[in-house]
Image (cartoon, rainbow, N blue to C red):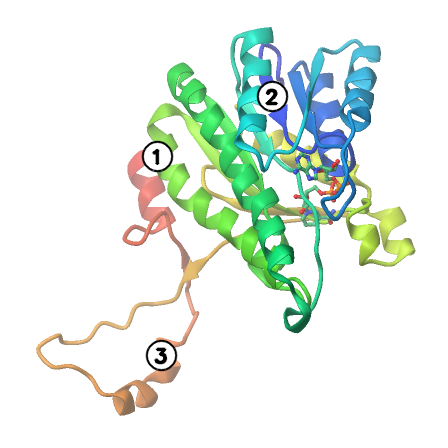
Amino acid sequence: MTVSFEGRVAAITGAGGGLGRSYALELAKRGAKVVVNDLGGDEFGGGGSNHMANAVVDEIRSAGGEAVANFGDISKYETGTSMVEAAISNWGRLDVLICNAGILRDVSFAKMTEEDWDIIFAVHVKGMFNACHNAWPHMREQKYGRIMLTSSTSGTWGNFGQTNYGAAKTAMLGFMNSLKQEGEKYNIHVNALTPAAGTRLTATVLPDEWLDKAKPEFVTPLVTYLVSENCPDNGSIYHAGMGRYHRTALMRGPVTEVDTDEVKTAEWMEDNWDQISSLDGAEAMWNGRVTQAEYDAQNK
Ligand SMILES: NC(=O)c1ccc[n+]([C@@H]2O[C@H](COP(=O)([O-])OP(=O)(O)OC[C@H]3O[C@@H](n4cnc5c(N)ncnc54)[C@H](O)[C@@H]3O)[C@@H](O)[C@H]2O)c1
């Protein structure tokens, strides 16, 4: 089926460059009206200018699309407010929110400063809250919303020198796991992405030959589908980059059930560790009680 955004309004944080710019251009090409938020700073959280957001708005308009710029730091609550207000005042609704703005402060934990920790949580986690908290009442009222949070394989698997960034990116998944449950009855879906692309952010850590090949445009089709009306997922994590696409999930291994009349010992745990630690037949979960398969069978 055609994936269309005719009549839809999208807001994308950090859309002045890299992945966010590519999403903005593609959604606009498919009919979405787009609020392009960007601080226009550097990849470590310094500086700021209107240039990046304005340039993407110009690109969209010159291709015949509709877009407005929203400047400012998404770690400030008022930027989330002004970004959502830009969507509502210009087009009366907000259907798609992509939390994409991001920076890096890579450093080994031994050398990390409190500021390296705080700024990463401010941009990625508080920035996500600021965008979603302002968008939520509108999406609830219109009974429709598609939110995509940008996590990272540093959050799902970890990466040397990224305890701050990895922890923030995992926090975004914890946020998704609860918000997906609150949004379900309002037809608001919340999903997450772990992208891999050559951008100015990855240029700080990866070799040129990889950067040249890993175009953001490889990631964009998956994101476009994920934030569309066509996609049924709510609470999923997908990976996309350089020709590789897969789902990632926190899984629960098979449950070992014991008689609760008697408390087991640590020695009993050791004796049964192979069974308790097994991931054979692990299942994705909808919440702490219900597997995804059970939930889907009841609700879809
Ligand atoms: N490129 C990858 O391989 C990769 C991998 C994993 C996760 N990510 C995540 O993807 C997202 C996009 O990254 P990218 O690779 O396109 O990098 P990028 O630096 O090209 O783009 C990030 C954009 O966010 C903007 N931004 C930064 N801080 C902001 C703030 N406080 N408020 C508003 N805008 C802000 C920047 O100006 C920039 O335009 C980030 O969240 C990043 O952590 C990227």
Instruction: Indicate the position of residue 299 as horizontal and vertical percent values.
Output: 31, 35
What amino acid type is highlighted by mark number 1? Glu
Q: Quarter containing ligand 1? A: top right
Q: Is residue 57 above or below residue 17?
A: above
Which residue lies at the image location 55% right of the left edge and 16% below the top edge?
Answer: 85
| The one of 170 and 242 positioned closer to us in this rendering | 170
Q: Is residue 3 visible?
A: yes
Q: Looking at numbered disc 3 in the image, what kind of residue is underneath it?
A: Gln
Q: CA distance from mark 1 to mark 3?
A: 34 Å
Mark drawn on residue 73:
none
Answer yes or no: is residue 232 visible.
no
Check disc 3: other Cα within 10 Å, few if <14, some if 14-19, many if 20+. some
Mark 3 CB near ligand 1 (8 Å cut)? no
Q: Secondary structure at mark 2?
A: strand
Q: Nearer the viewer, residue 134 or 25?
A: 134
Which of the two labelled residues, at mark 1 and mark 2, occupies the earlier sequence position?
2
Q: Residue at x 79, y 23 (%)?
A: 56
Instruction: From the image, tell me which residue sits under label 1.
Output: 182
Rendered-image quadrant of the C terminus: top left
Question: What number is the disc on residue 275?
Answer: 3
Residue 185 occupies quadrant: top left
Say what secondary structure mark 1 lies in.
helix
Is 63 left, or right, of 131 in this rendering?
Answer: right
Q: Residue at x 59, y 62 (%)?
A: 157
Q: Mark 2 or mark 3: which is in front?
A: 2
Dot 2, crowdedness within 10 Å: few (<14), some or many (≥20)? many
Q: Which residue is mark 2?
A: 10
Q: Amino acid at mark 2?
A: Ala
Considering depth in this image, is 47 or 146 the residue closer to the camera?
Answer: 47
**Is 298 rendered above or below residue 93?**
below
Q: Nearer the viewer, mark 1 or mark 3?
A: 1
Residue 5, image x and y in percent? 62, 17
